[in-house]
Amino acid sequence: MRIQSDTNVGQLAAEHPLATRVFHRHGIDFCCGGGRQLQETCTARGVDTEMVLEEIRKELSNTSIPEERWDQASLEDLVQHILVDYHQPLQEELPRLESMAQRVLEVHGDKDPDTLSELVEVYAGLKAELDQHMMKEEQILFPMISQGQGAMAGGPVAVMEHEHASAGAALRRLRELTKDYQVPSEACNTWRALWHGLAALEESLHQHIHLENNILFPRALRG
């Protein structure tokens, strides 16, 4: 595959998974914004396109480990990968982070009441949406795909993509509220762990949504 500025970001991420390391470093949306060309996305982010391309080529040349190509896996294997590597961990991680966020607000709310209150509110909304979202995927959409009925799943897919965009907006707001997850000097261990946990959640969700939006859904709809 050619790696050029007019290649779609989602296509780059699907065919060269190591490129997502570069995208994450520069805040480039490769999940919900995967349909945009790299140059368009870089311009919107104020990032030099040629620099990003060079970093991607360097990532690819510096590894001898074959990239895991989920765009070449069977749909059933991809669904199982999403369930095991993303849905199951989220079922534990989402309530853990919620508990920490509540604790930080209770103990340190006086230090930055507006920010911490909104953070708890935004996170609670994200968690509630993800809980419902995963349930709908597991009970409706994924069984349709596994049974070879993906071509008839246009309605459920559209709903999932809309919810992905909503989750992406919540993640962006959390990053704004945390100032790019820069840990405050006065932060306790729980506060630090919360910031690190939210940053890790963002990275994982970007990969998760990318696998669905840019690989699973298009392939399933094609039948």
Image (tube, helix red, strand yellow):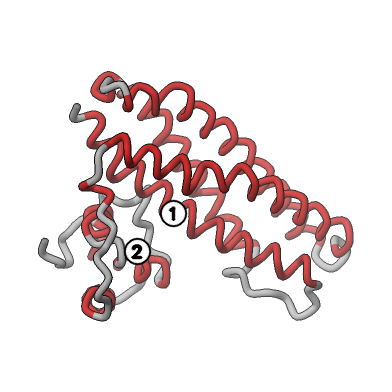
- Which residue type does callout 2 highlight? Thr
Which of disc 2 and disc 1 is earlier in sequence? 2
Q: Along the horizontal axis of the image, is 80 left or right of 175?
A: left
Q: How far across and down, in percent of the image, does residue 24 sit?
A: 41, 66
Element at badge 2? helix
Q: Residue at x 15, y 67 (%)?
A: 3
Density class for disc 2 (Cα within 10 Å; few <14, some 14-19, many ≥20) is: many
Quickly name the residue at label 2.
20
How many numbered marks are there?
2
Q: Along the horizontal axis of the image, is 195 left or right of 37?
A: right
Please say if 116 is above or below 138. Answer: below
Q: How far across and down, in percent of the image, does residue 137 sit?
A: 46, 29
Please say if 48 is above or below 83. Answer: below
Q: Are marks 1 and 2 in contact (CB under 8 Å)?
A: yes
Q: Residue at x 61, y 59 (%)?
A: 198
- Front residue of this view, candidates 49 and 20: 20
- Which residue type does callout 1 highlight? His
Quickly name the residue at label 1.
206
Q: Residue at x 26, y 80 (%)?
A: 62
Q: How far apart in space, not on screen, are marks 1 and 2 (Cα)?
A: 9 Å
